[in-house]
């Protein structure tokens, strides 16, 4: 495996010597290259501002007649429509859902995108809940807040009924010689039974420790009633119709993170029940993060394979409201991951077009395997880069050895003559240059290995899934949370090559571009459809006689309408031409 996190950064060797001459300021996410967005271009913003100004002019013309305030009049209806359009605001949010099973690195991906270390995390045992939908929203405050929505008692009963039936069905057929069931059927039944057992143990492990057999032996209705009694006794708000817990706020990230982990993971105390089996969703997590500040909502969604039907329906319904979905998977199993396949199948059934893939752990790569398994061109380049690293290591070792040989014991300056001093100065300069070249050579090797593997996996995934979506290009990102987090706080000049290699910056830019795309569509609809529709309604009203409006006022409205239509047509023509130029 290439130890990306153990390699020196390209600039680290020289930084040790230059000290204060180097800017030690770390990378700032606000300095990242913004997405290329038509909406933010000056000419489009000018067109939008002109259009809003024209509607404001129209409001002024319509309100100049006292009839605009007459209840029920046509001019008042038109006036109110104009006022509403004159107050146009950009759409507030776009939602991106991250779907993936436990263990694929989804929490780490969220931390990297939010630019917060260890914010979303699993328990110390690594046991994370993969069943609860969690939304991440922006707020300007420095603190953290969350809102939790619990299942009602009736919803819990429905889930427990299904889980209990799955558990019993598996154990009933476990020792049967039922030839009607295929291997896939048996495997599916076993997975559902395991999910049921895990859920019951998580919710009631203090009760089930000594009496798990009662799940099989007692009558179904008695078991269900017992489970519901235990659920109520947890003290969680699972009784009633509306089970939204009031917003809870926290001043410190660590305290908040621990609380969130307590809701979504197994508790450390073996006698304490888990809360996640009773939670419908973490409906809001509020924090101040740059990626959320532009109107993005990130949603942590469970994988689809291990959910009971009630939770699966919640997740599927939620996916329908996402503006884009990313299937998150391990890069080493990306092309065979059944979770990715199921996300695309769901997207196809629901006619979802905005879908992509994020492959995690791009840093987990073996140079020997890549050299052996890749084509001749890539294999030769890997060999060249590895030879370069090995040669520079030898030079570095030889230089160190020569410096040691020419340095007197005790390093007493008086024992060094001018010739020896000059030689040591030259050797130290060589050591500094070699260290810098070696660090760069290691980085070039790492970058080549990671980049070529990323390109290979991306091509394979696009070949597999491109025909299952309507968009022209399937977005695929290969990322390393390890590379990002290990270099995040280093001086930006030193860290940036690694941060770019991590792929996190590219995913963040893509997500932000979705917000701008939504704003562009809404603004284009506003300029090319909403305003002309209002003008058309006013035109029809004038042609119909304009009610009791006087001839002079009618003529003024007619003149203003003609001027606004002409100016708006010029703006719309520019917008259409600009959109055509961009394909």
Image: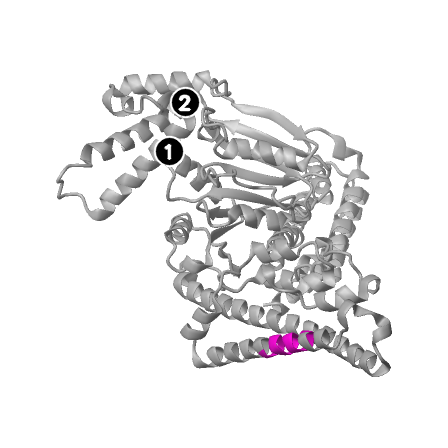
Q: Is residue 72 above or below residue 227?
A: below
Q: Quadrant of residue 287?
A: top right
Local packing at callout 2 (Cα closer than 10 Å; few below 14, some 14-19, many 20+) is some
The secondary element bearing badge 1 is classed as helix
Residue 407's x, y, as percent? 76, 74
Residue 357's x, y, as percent? 48, 56
In the image, 565: left or right of 19? left
Magenta includes 393? yes
Q: How many marks?
A: 2
The secondary element bearing badge 2 is classed as helix
Q: Which residues are magenta?
A: 391-400
Question: Cα distance, mark 2 to mark 1?
Answer: 13 Å
Identify which residue, 55 or 469, lies in the foreground: 469
Q: Nearer the viewer, mark 2 or mark 1?
A: 2
Q: What residue did someone put label 1 on? A: 198
Magenta includes 215? no
Q: Is residue 180 above or below residue 454?
A: above
The disc label shown at residue 206, or none:
2
Most common secondary structure along the magenta stretch: helix
Identify which residue, 304 or 191, lies in the foreground: 191
Local packing at callout 1 (Cα closer than 10 Å; few below 14, some 14-19, many 20+) is some
Q: Is residue 139 visible?
A: yes
In the image, 333: left or right of 92? left
Residue 200's x, y, as percent? 37, 28
The residue shown at (71%, 76%) is 405
The residue shown at (53%, 61%) is 363
């Amino acid at each position: 495996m290439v130890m990306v996190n153990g390699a020196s950064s390209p600039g680290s060797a020289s930084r040790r010597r230059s000290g204060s001459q180097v800017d030690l300021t770390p990378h700032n996410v606000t300095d990242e290259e913004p997405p290329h967005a038509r909406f933010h271009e000056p000419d489009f913003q000018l067109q939008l501002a002109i259009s809003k100004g024209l509607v404001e002019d129209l409001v002024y013309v319509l309100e100049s007649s006292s009839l605009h305030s007459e209840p029920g009049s046509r001019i008042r209806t038109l006036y109110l429509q104009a006022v509403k359009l004159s107050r146009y605001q950009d759409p507030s949010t776009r939602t991106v859902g991250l779907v993936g099973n436990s263990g694929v690195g989804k929490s780490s991906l969220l931390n990297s995108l939010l630019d917060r270390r260890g914010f979303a995390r699993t328990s110390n045992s690594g046991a994370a809940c993969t069943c609860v939908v969690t939304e991440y929203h922006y707020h300007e405050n420095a603190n953290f807040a969350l809102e939790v929505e619990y299942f009602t008692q009736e919803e819990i009963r429905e889930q427990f009924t299904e889980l209990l039936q799955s558990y019993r069905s598996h154990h009933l057929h476990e020792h049967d010689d039922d030839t009607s069931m295929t291997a896939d059927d048996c495997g599916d039944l076993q997975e559902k039974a395991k999910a049921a057992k895990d859920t019951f143990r998580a919710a009631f492990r203090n009760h089930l420790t000594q009496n798990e057999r009662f799940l099989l032996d007692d009558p179904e209705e008695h078991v269900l009633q017992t489970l519901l009694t235990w659920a109520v006794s947890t003290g969680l708000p699972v009784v009633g119709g509306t089970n939204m817990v009031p917003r809870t706020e926290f001043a410190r990230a660590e305290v908040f993170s621990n609380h969130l982990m307590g809701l979504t993971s197994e508790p450390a105390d073996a006698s304490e029940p888990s809360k996640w089996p009773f939670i419908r969703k973490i409906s809001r997590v509020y924090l101040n993060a740059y990626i959320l500040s532009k109107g993005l909502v990130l949603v942590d969604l469970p994988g689809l394979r291990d959910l009971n039907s009630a939770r699966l329906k919640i997740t599927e319904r939620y996916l329908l409201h996402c503006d884009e979905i990313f299937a998150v998977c391990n890069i080493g199993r990306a092309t065979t991951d059944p979770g990715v396949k199921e996300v695309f199948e769901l997207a196809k059934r629901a006619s979802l077009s905005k879908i992509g893939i994020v492959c995690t752990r791009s840093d987990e790569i073996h140079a020997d395997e890549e050299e052996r398994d890749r084509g001749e061109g890539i294999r030769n380049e890997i060999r060249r880069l590895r030879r370069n690293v090995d040669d520079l290591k030898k030079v570095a070792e030889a230089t160190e050895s020569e410096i040691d040989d020419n340095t007197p014991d005790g390093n007493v300056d008086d024992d060094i003559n001018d010739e020896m001093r000059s030689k040591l100065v030259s050797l130290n300069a060589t050591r500094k240059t070699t260290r810098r070249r070696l660090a760069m050579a290691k980085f070039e090797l790492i970058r080549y290995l990671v980049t070529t593997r990323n390109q290979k996996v991306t091509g394979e995934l696009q070949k597999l899934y491109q025909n299952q979506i309507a968009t022209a290009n399937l977005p695929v990102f290969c990322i390393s949370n390890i590379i990002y987090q290990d270099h995040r706080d280093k001086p930006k000049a030193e860290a940036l090559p690694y941060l770019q290699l991590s792929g996190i910056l590219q995913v963040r830019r893509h997500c932000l571009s979705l917000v701008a795309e939504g704003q562009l569509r809404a603004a284009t609809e506003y300029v090319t459809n909403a305003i002309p529709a209002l003008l058309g309604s006013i035109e029809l009203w004038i042609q119909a006689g304009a009610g009791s409006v006087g001839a002079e006022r009618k003529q003024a409205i007619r003149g203003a309408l003609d001027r606004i239509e002409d100016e708006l047509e010029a703006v719309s023509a520019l917008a259409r031409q600009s959109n055509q130029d961009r394909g």
